[in-house]
Amino acid sequence: MSFPSRDQLIDFVLDEAQLLDTRQYAAWLDLFTDDARYWMPLEPGQTDPLLHNSLMYEDKLLLRIRIERLAGSRTFSEQPATRCHHLLQTPRIESMDEQAGECQLRTAFHYVETRLDRQTLFAGWATHHLVLHEGALRIRLKRIDLVNSDAAFGNISLFM
């Protein structure tokens, strides 16, 4: 596969959000490389997920476990299921290295998570580090920077 066009990169990010909004978690997880990370820093500008606390720093195994928990019949906190909606600005390509098969996109978003009569709004930026892997575009790192990342949060059930 040749390196994706600008439109294909943008469509990838938009399609990823749609998979989450429609609860297609297995297909969403397939977008990640085996060594991928999903990172939500605790502090603005945080540069190291290992030496500082984060809201989330999960590898593919932990993401899979969360997805299995969401689908579990004994997960009573998910009955009825939590739903979400992503409202994204057009993703911006921040860097691209066609030779290495890597690029980085940054997307401003509003994200709503709702269950029963409770609705929670989050706002921030998603940064996707994408790589060409076995002929397909995959996520190596998805970083979520919340505007108010240093605030006290309740349970964040799904994925932004």
Image: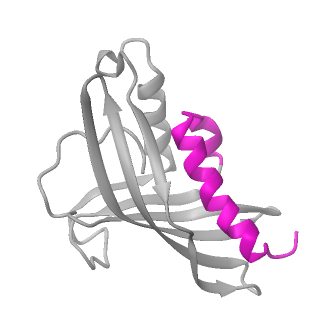
Q: Nearer the viewer, residue 50 or 115?
A: 115
Q: Is residue 121 visible?
A: yes
Question: Is any part of residue 32 visible from this angle?
Answer: no
Q: Where does residue 65 sit, x and y in percent of width and height?
A: 45, 35
Q: Which residues are magenta?
A: 1-30
Image quarter for residue 98? bottom right
Examine the rendered structure and indicate whether residue 112 appears above or below residue 53: above
* Residue 20 on the magenta segment: yes
Percent position (x, y) of residue 149? 22, 63
- Residue under the image location 38 percent in, 50 percent down: 111
Point 29% across, 48% down: residue: 121
Residue 17 on the magenta span = yes
User: Left or right: 118 with respect to 64?
Assistant: left
**What's the colour scheme?**
one colour
Q: Could you tell me which quadrant the N terminus lies in? A: bottom right
What's the residue at 43%, 12% (across, down)?
A: 73
State the residue lying farthest toward the right.
1
Residue 37: % across, % down: 47, 59
Q: Nearer the viewer, residue 3 or 66?
A: 3
In the image, is 56 to the left or to the right of 25?
left
Q: Is residue 147 above or below residue 62?
A: below
Q: Residue at x 23, y 39 (%)?
A: 155
From the image, give the main secondary structure of the stretch colored magenta: helix
